[in-house]
Image (tube, rainbow, N blue to C red):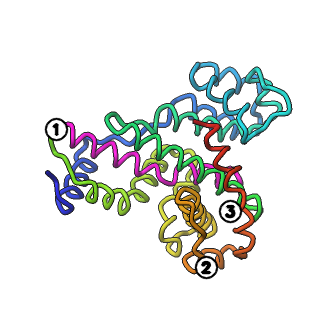
Amino acid sequence: MLNAQALPRRIDELLVSGRYEPPVLPEVAQAVLRETSKASCEPRRLADILKRDAAMAAGVLRMANSPAYAPVSPIVSLSQAISRLGLEAIRRMAVAVACESRLFRVRGREAEARALYFRSTVGAFVAQELARHLRLNVEDAFLGGLLHDLGEIILLGLVADLEATGSAAPIDAVRAVLSERHAAVGAAAVEHWALIPRVAVAIRHHHETEGATDTASASLLFISDHVVAAFLDARPLDAQALAPALGRLNLYFDDLEAVAARRDELLGWARGLE
């Protein structure tokens, strides 16, 4: 049994041993991000990229018809999804589908991984709506909200690997490791992708925002993380805990409460992605 002191040491050994490889964003998702970042991005070319991966294509179509995007009439093709929803929406969907189908999966810890994915999608939509209110970059906010706890799923996978060798750990020790290490581990993984560097900075500092080079993005994730916790625990927002981050964003608590009042709607959007 690994105690609270031994577990972090074993995790560190795995991270630096050369046996650990950062999670890889699926090739089709990477191609979508590259293609949509081009000024000359062609919808037909983008549809062809998505069709390379049947699960990705099906996931994007499912998301395009979910409550979060609420199409007036059903979207039945990738070309239709691209033309009606736009390139930025397709970028967000591609990463979300990759998270759901590939990244947020841990053998032996399936229920915890699914809960983390749901919490992350709620965070993505909360961050997106806050960014819209503040006129910040909506796509960066969505991806930051979606990936800000990626480090937790990575660490959970390492814990599962240790357990598979007979090195179990008490739940309190696992929770402490996830809490203390997830921001740095998740940021390092996103940095490894070299596709969305601004998001990696915000992820690294979403709990300690004052050290960030982009305090606005980090503060946005800090706030959205607190909002999600309040949503899932069905409790009110803590104005005192949020005050410094709200001040850095010039965001009034009343404005934040207006977003929080949409709890059922935003939770419904996230459920539509499961």
Quarter of the image with the C terminus in it: top right
How many residues crowd around disc 2 within 10 Å: few (fewer than 14), some, or many (20 or more)? some
Residue type, mark 1 in image: Thr
Question: Which badge, 2 or 3, comes first in the chain's sequence?
Answer: 2
Q: Which residue is mark 1?
A: 165
**Lower sequence index among marks 1 and 2:** 1
Dividing the picture into quadrants, the one containing residue 161 is top left
Q: Which of disc 3 and disc 1 is earlier in sequence?
A: 1
Q: Is label 2 in a helix, a strand or a loop?
A: helix
Viewer-proximal residue, 270 or 196? 270
Secondary structure found at label 1: loop
Q: 10 Å neighbourhood of mark 1: few (<14), some, or many (≥20)?
A: few
Discs 1, 2 touching: Cβ within 8 Å:
no
CB of mark 2 within 8 Å of CB of mark 3? no
Is label 3 in a helix, a strand or a loop?
helix
Label 1 to label 2: alpha-carbon separation: 45 Å
Instruction: Name the residue nearer the viewer: 73 or 150.
Output: 73
| Residue at image coords 40%, 44% | 112
The residues tagged by marks 2 and 3 sit, at their Cα atoms, a distance apart of 15 Å
User: Splitting the image into 4 quarters, where does residue 202 fall?
Assistant: bottom right
Q: Callout 3: few (<14), some (14-19), or many (20+) C-alpha neighbours within 10 Å? A: many
Seen in the image, is 239 located left or right of residue 167? Answer: right
Marks 1 and 3, how far apart at CA = 43 Å
Check if residue 152 falls in the magenta segment. yes
The secondary structure making up most of the magenta span is helix
Residue 21: give x, y in percent of width and height. 34, 40
Magenta highlight on residue 88: no
Instruction: Report which residue position mark 2 lands on.
Output: 243
Q: What segment is highlighted magenta in the picture?
A: 138-165
Disc number lying in front (2 or 3): 3
Circle 3 residue: 260
Going by the numbered disc 2, the residue's amino acid type is Ala
